[in-house]
Amino acid sequence: MLIYIYLIAITAEAMSGALAAGRRNMDLFGVALIAFLTALGGGTVRDVLLGNFPVTWTQHPPYIYLTVSAGLLTMLLARFMKHLHQLFLILDGMGLIAFTIIGCNVALRLDYETPVVVMAGITTGIFGGILRDIMCNRTPQVLRHELYASISLLVALLYLFLMNQGVDQDINMLASFSVGLLIRMTAIRYQLSLPVFSYAPNKWTD
Amino acid sequence: MLIYIYLIAITAEAMSGALAAGRRNMDLFGVALIAFLTALGGGTVRDVLLGNFPVTWTQHPPYIYLTVSAGLLTMLLARFMKHLHQLFLILDGMGLIAFTIIGCNVALRLDYETPVVVMAGITTGIFGGILRDIMCNRTPQVLRHELYASISLLVALLYLFLMNQGVDQDINMLASFSVGLLIRMTAIRYQLSLPVFSYAPNKWTD
Amino acid sequence: MLIYIYLIAITAEAMSGALAAGRRNMDLFGVALIAFLTALGGGTVRDVLLGNFPVTWTQHPPYIYLTVSAGLLTMLLARFMKHLHQLFLILDGMGLIAFTIIGCNVALRLDYETPVVVMAGITTGIFGGILRDIMCNRTPQVLRHELYASISLLVALLYLFLMNQGVDQDINMLASFSVGLLIRMTAIRYQLSLPVFSYAPNKWTD
């Protein structure tokens, strides 16, 4: 089941990448590339960090076609995106959580220690969005918005805790996924956010 | 012959990196580093993505000296660059295409599937310029300008198509190179470009 | 002894990352992530470039805790940072130099050629700060400020020269470290800097 959620997730992420590219007036090629990077960049960074070669998407060419197509299609659908905003946020939240669980599984399979497994989950969850924002020359949104990246951390911790308690793998995934999505939806609904650190010295050169 | 074009190409790319660094008032060290990254960054990203270790330039120290020198020399030549604009664009176009073909060859040697070979070619062709722009805090130009990155895609596809048709390797390289350069020159001459996607919602938080 | 300096160094770098995140009004999670990236990003980029897997910090989870804690603690200490500016600059300089020597050692252990060893030292020394600035959407400060990145180059060259002369490893480290720190302190005191390259053509499209 995770694979279906994964496919929906990379599609949603590709669309978010395409919209960000559109805000920077990129051409067809730029839109396709940013869509691809947003959808598969998080997993790529994770694979490189963990030394997990070959990188996952290089073994699954259909992922390339899917994300590039989703990106290009978004150009046609852009005018309707406003009305699909709620749906889009849900799909994006599902992606964040599915990516996180998948990332943890990859690191677990390679026998990394728990803190690294958590980092692998978070990296998979949020780095696609970070790469998107770097490519579009803006400060990463995922580190500033309402509860988003921290939900990735929470899901990773919950997933590993339940695994440690001997909970069945399928039930664990379902539980972690549901709890994560519920918190994400609550955060959007009530605009919950972490405390923000604002630092504005008058004279500081670094 | 590709090796000579390659050397010219990394020199041209290093110069383009140095000029971009100059626009950001970087010091000698910054100029040298951006020159190096622009020239050899695309191949580095490709090698890391494909798990092709050791990374190519680490086995060819002269490439380091060449790109750093070209970058520093550009500081002296900057005042003449305006007059060399046309020549520079041609060298840059040659670089884009040579990089693309070389990138495809690396992925082919490692037995990756066709779509990944194309991605490797494009990555080698355009990622140096993308890294340059990220380091200089601007939106990647290669994704916004007239036909540029898409020529990398086109050359990769043509090269693989001719290879698939059993065309001799040398003739194939020459043909792909010539066609690519011709299209690039035409694109510059007539300012051809891909359709641009402009997305500017009044209220959209992602 | 280098390990103690290293721990002080990653703490200082994490704090510098947290302050940069605070200037962009990031939330708790963003502060922690940027702190981690600033402190351990340079070594990570080095390990990936050299194909040195597993990446160092994945084998030392305490480094994750230390840098994240230092980042979060900085939020509380921020109001006092102004008074600690001098101390902070010294710690940061120590970090730059310790990172450089460690980076050289890693590349030497993997039998890379001298120019690559130098690049590995520089990468370890300055790439954490570069990643910090990219994540915070600003032009890398290390390439613009007074003598900073170039001290990394100087220390790497001195360290390799003394090694080549058969100087005892411990004495070499101490000497390279001391000379580097002295120059860095002098550069700060007298605001020494490399020549800057300013390029501002009226009409240039690349």
Image (cartoon, coloured by chain):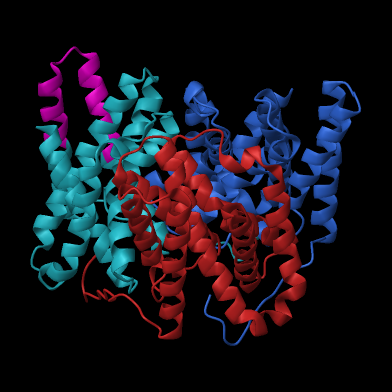
Chain colours: A cyan, B red, C blue
x, y percent for residue B119:
36, 50
Pick the front one: B4 or A14? B4
Q: Is residue C40 magenta?
A: no
Specify the principal SS of the magenta part: helix
Q: Is residue B119 above or below residue B192?
A: above
Q: Residue at x 34, y 54 (%)?
A: B162
Q: Is residue A76 toward the left or the right of residue B89 in the image?
A: left
Residue placed furthest toward the top:
A166
Q: Is residue A172 magenta?
A: yes
x, y percent for residue B199:
24, 74
x, y percent for residue C158:
84, 38
Q: Is residue C137 visible?
A: no
* Tally of numbered tags: 0
Q: Residue at x 47, y 26 (%)?
A: C58
Pick the front one: A48 or B8? B8
Please provide the residue range marked out in magenta.
A152-179
Q: Is residue B199 above or below residue C159?
A: below
Q: Residue at x 63, y 67 (%)?
A: B21
Query: In the rendered image, which quarter is residue B72 located in?
Result: bottom right
